Amino acid sequence: MMDCDQYRRAILADPHGVSAEMRSHVAGCHDCTQYTERVQRFEDKLDRALRVDIAPGARVRGLRGLRTRLARSPRRRRRWLAAAASLLLACVVAGSLWLVAPGSSLAADVVNHMAEEPDAWARTDVPVPQPQLDAVFGESHMRLKADAGLVTYASSCLFRGHQVPHLVVQTTTGPVTVMVLTHETTRGQQRFNDQGYQGVIEAVPGHGSLAVLERGSAFDERTIEAVIAQVQSAIDWTS
Amino acid sequence: MKDPVGGNQKRARFQALCQSLRPDLLRFAFWLSRDRALAEDVVQETMLRAWKSQDSLQDEGSAKPWLLTIIRREYARTFERKRFVTLDVDELISKEEPTLAAADDEDLAELRVAIFKLPDEYREPLVLQVLMGYSTAEIAAELGLTNAAVLTRLFRARKQLRALCGEDTRMDPEISVDSQE
């Protein structure tokens, strides 16, 4: 039987790899429940801290290249120094702009992907045939059971280097897009509101995450939650 | 007979694949090297090597770990070539201040500085786990360690970070001397 020390050691080593033994311990331990909540909050922060904004490195790369050239041709140094000063100034300006530019987050990539498939958002009541759903999910080694709701669009898309199922589910408030991101491990639920799309990235323990979003000002939390639950339970992850 | 159309499509697909993975690879290289310029050089070199040997990648699904392994090798090679002297962490932090800064969250910047201060052997598995989504077994395979050693390093990494960031560590377990490495 696991004790508190063993549990905390394990949760600190892998806050998302909770075994049955750990679950059984924490279910009956108030202190470890509180400890877990604190560790999870810290983990969310750690995840955000590691996702530094990395923009294309024209600024630094230019400077490094210049340094190399300077070292190779000492007679031209003065002229190069003047050029370097100008370049440095340009780089500082570019760098400042880079600092205020948004980084490439998962949510931003999901939103950018939406622009590639605008037809997916059509309001319709024509369901995607099951063989097509099987083919789309089959590419990602999964299966979507029939109880996922009215799925009117399904495509297997290349997203961040992986084929991922991209669906549209019709709801009473309009079409809701779902991307099944088994390769994107996230923590908890992250909301986003970007370029006219609102939604959430929902962590699915052991299976990456789901991106669920609506277009325009139609964001309805209950609808989003319902679609998450519906799609999540309809996916056979290990087909 | 060669298929130029198929070949072009394959190359375009590979290029798109590399582009989509680039931000995460760059972040990984940044945390590995703690030097943004060096990270960019390493990723650039990695992409070139990957491009040359793209035929050896059979499955696009394994592109990320494949590129990541090349990054680690390339970084080790760069490190060997340049024969770096002992790194001054404070100097590194000051040099990378713009990347570590978080305009809307001071705690985040503080945590990034704390990550910089972690020893390499703790920082790397932590980044693989949290940023790259690697499992314990995958980290063990990549770093040539046992699962138990990986878990010990991850535990120590988080324990150190929590202490450096002023978290309440009273309930944290002690680091036992017999932790497996």
Image: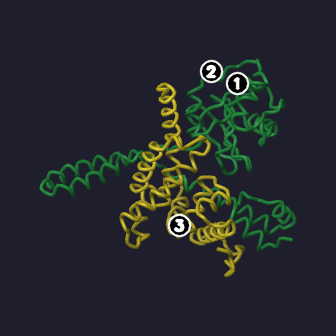
Answer left or right for B152 relative to B82: right
Q: Secondary structure at mark 2?
A: helix
- Across and down, in percent, residue A135 comes to 73, 28
Name the residue located 76 percent from the left edge and 34 percent from the top edge: A223
Name the residue located 49 percent from the left edge and 40 percent from the top edge: B19
A73 up-or-down from A221: above or below: below
Type of amino acid at the residue the image marks with label 3: Ala
Q: CA distance from mark 3 to mark 2?
A: 46 Å
Q: Which residue in the protein does label 3 denote?
A: B114
- Across and down, in percent, residue A143 comes to 78, 35
Of the numbered discs in the image, which one, if any, rests on residue A153?
1
Which of the chains is yellow? B
Answer left or right for B39 relative to A74: right
Name the residue located 53 percent from the left edge and 44 percent from the top edge: B56
Type of amino acid at the residue the image marks with label 2: Asp
Q: Same chain, marks 3 and 1? A: no
- Asked if the residue at tag 1 contacts the one at tag 2, i.e. Cβ–Cβ closer than 8 Å, the answer is yes
Q: Secondary structure at mark 3?
A: helix
Answer left or right for B31 relative to A174: left
| First of labels 2, 1 by sequence position | 2
- Chain letter for mark 1, please: A
Type of amino acid at the residue the image marks with label 1: Tyr
Q: Which residue in the protein does label 2 denote?
A: A119
Q: How is the image coloured?
A: by chain
- Chain letter for mark 3, please: B
Q: Nearer the viewer, mark 3 or mark 1?
A: 1
